Image (spheres, grey):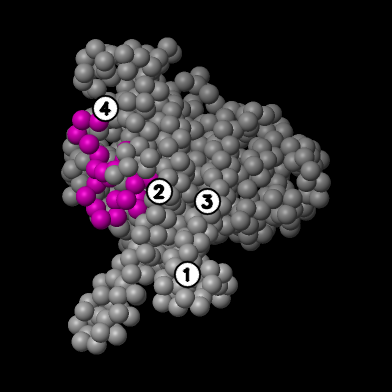
Amino acid sequence: MTAMDFFGHQEQARRATRWLVAWFGLAVAGIIATVYIAAVVLLSATDVQRGNWQPEVLLGIAAGTIGIVTIAALFKTSQLRAGGPAVATMLGGLPVDPATSDPHERRLLNIVEEMSIASGVPVPQVFVLQQEQGINAFAAGWGTADAAVAVTRGCLEQLDRDELQGVIAHEFSHVFHGDMRLNIRLMGVLFGILCIATIGEIIVRTVGRSGMRSGNSKNKGGAAGIVLFGIVLWIIGYLGVFFAGLIKAAVSRQREYLADAAAVQYTRNPRGIGLALAKIGGIGGRLESAHAEEASHMLFADGVKRLFGGLHATHPPIEQRVERILPGFLKHLQSTGDAVAAVAATPLPAGMAGLAGAAPAPRPATNPDAMFADLGNPRQEHVAQARQFLGNLPLELATAARDPHQARALVLALLLDDQVAGRDAQLRLLQERDQALAYDVRTLATSALKDHRGDRLPLLELAVPALRRLDETAKTTLRADARRIAMADGRLSPFELALLKTLERHVRLAGELPRRPGRPAALIARPAEASVVLSVLARAGATDEVAAARAFAAGLAQLQGVPTLQLLPAPACTIEALEQGIDRLAELSPFGKRLLLQACGAAAANDGHIAPHEAELLRALAETWDCPVPPPLPAS
């Protein structure tokens, strides 16, 4: 099976986080040493008996500094526990209504929907920074379950569709490759270091004012010493921020090149993102928000004015970014002097001319290699297929997916059984609680949905933003109704499992925070959970015990070094065990997830192909583990 770049990017982000912790420790150590030296100098000036080595002072400063910085960093990170929406709101973003009639916002939502369906993830929350006229955008969150994509009003108004698609594709790369959670951790770290400077500033202002009001010369002298110490803290704190800014710039620059390249891969249209970058070079991408510096490393382009030139630049120069995706751009820029004209004049790289907007190329997911080849990296064919799906969607379904109350009926209609007897039993359960809702569900299922049963996962992904807008009571009721209908026949199909897990992850109740990534676990540390999942996959396409054993062995062969897994008897493969196993396996390291998905794919394909219900289960597992699998392309 071929290597998956998606997991390599995830692992790189995880390693970058470890380096961030190390650099953070060095920055704090430097602050402690500098504060200690300043304190010793000030104390020696007032008491000549004191020596240069004062361990009790060092201990107190170290404890105080570490405590302040750590508490501040944890406080800031806790503020952002809600993920991307918290960051977007902090920067002045307003959520976009899924049913908006604003033409700019409608175009934005269509592009985001295309990218989401093409990649196999529910549509994230979309925000617009209405007061920002510069051209900029960002994606933020701990993972796909709490991701938010935001653009400035200038981005909406100044870019055409191809250019905006290039920007959104760039941001989706950050969603897939682990950059978002690294960016949120950076915000927490920098806030912790900034607190030292803030405390110094507070000391100068409060003590300085009270000391000046005092008529006692002795009090004035003491206040002057404290004010001087506050000034020193302020200077030291901003020195820490200076070096932390260097760390932030070093961490983020290279990842911008990777996201630009990914955007070209997704759209096969380097000129779209190239023109967006060229327009930023002319119009600018600066944000006016007071929090722009905190979030500068997660923006599409540098959004703040830099006092130290390129030292603190969180993004590579615009010209270099365009040259990487459109080789020859710099030569044309020298001759024209106009970045937009230079992009238009630069020939497309070989193999890309005429591909933007092409029809999907056949590539059915009949084996694990084909299914996982584009994991986290949808191709232009997937985007074109998603655009075709949205364009052909009946108005009744499109309207239902984007209206909160109708979306409830749509989601429940997706769960209805194909057989009349099973469907009637499910509807009776719903009628006992809400006759009007049961009527809407039946109407959708027997009219608009009858020819779109194969589009259930994309429709579910499309409906998620509207479902997030329901009040708490409606969300609670929806989740209970969905589980009741899914379990009406006493079992859970792969799609039913996918739908229930999607509601849990993406339509959360108040107090249900997204799962924050902790210390990753090795696959060998989760043998019981891996046995459950692999046993379910092995039995999903097997007709007897012999076939199930062969499928399990095929999967186990992919898990080198995990010999303790065993095929569980059918009664042990319960719904409860499967759901618990899925949640525990979400804690695996990126490479652990890769091995497990390879094993699941091998088990499902042991009979020579992956059946539709097996593909649904594989995609459900992968999305739950933040490993989005694009939908299969149509066979020729």
State which quadrant residue 91 falls in: bottom left
Q: Residues within 10 Å of mark 3 (few under 14, many from 20)?
A: some
Question: To which residue does mark 3 refer?
Answer: 23
- In the rendered structure, the answer to whether residue 321 lies left or right of residue 374 reads left
Question: To which residue does mark 2 refer?
Answer: 245
Q: Residue at x 36, y 57 (%)?
A: 238
Disc on the earlier residue, 2 or 4: 2
Disc on the earlier residue, 3 or 2: 3
* Circle 2: element type: helix
**Badge nearest the viewer, 2 or 4:** 2
Q: Is residue 25 visible?
A: yes
Question: To which residue does mark 1 refer?
Answer: 40
Is 52 in front, or is 55? 52
In the rendered image, residue 219, in percent from the top left (x then y), is placed at 29, 84
* Circle 4: element type: helix
In magenta, the rendered stretch is 281-306
**Badge nearest the viewer, 1 or 3:** 1
Q: CA distance from mark 2 to mark 1?
A: 28 Å
Residue 512 falls inside the magenta stretch: no
Question: To which residue does mark 4 refer?
Answer: 278
Amino acid type of disc 3?
A: Trp
Disc on the earlier residue, 1 or 3: 3
Q: Residue furthest bottom?
A: 216
Disc on the earlier residue, 2 or 1: 1
Residue 292 falls inside the magenta stretch: yes
344 shown above or below 315: above
Q: CA distance from mark 4 to mark 3?
A: 34 Å
Disc on the earlier residue, 1 or 4: 1
Q: CA distance from mark 1 to mark 3?
A: 26 Å
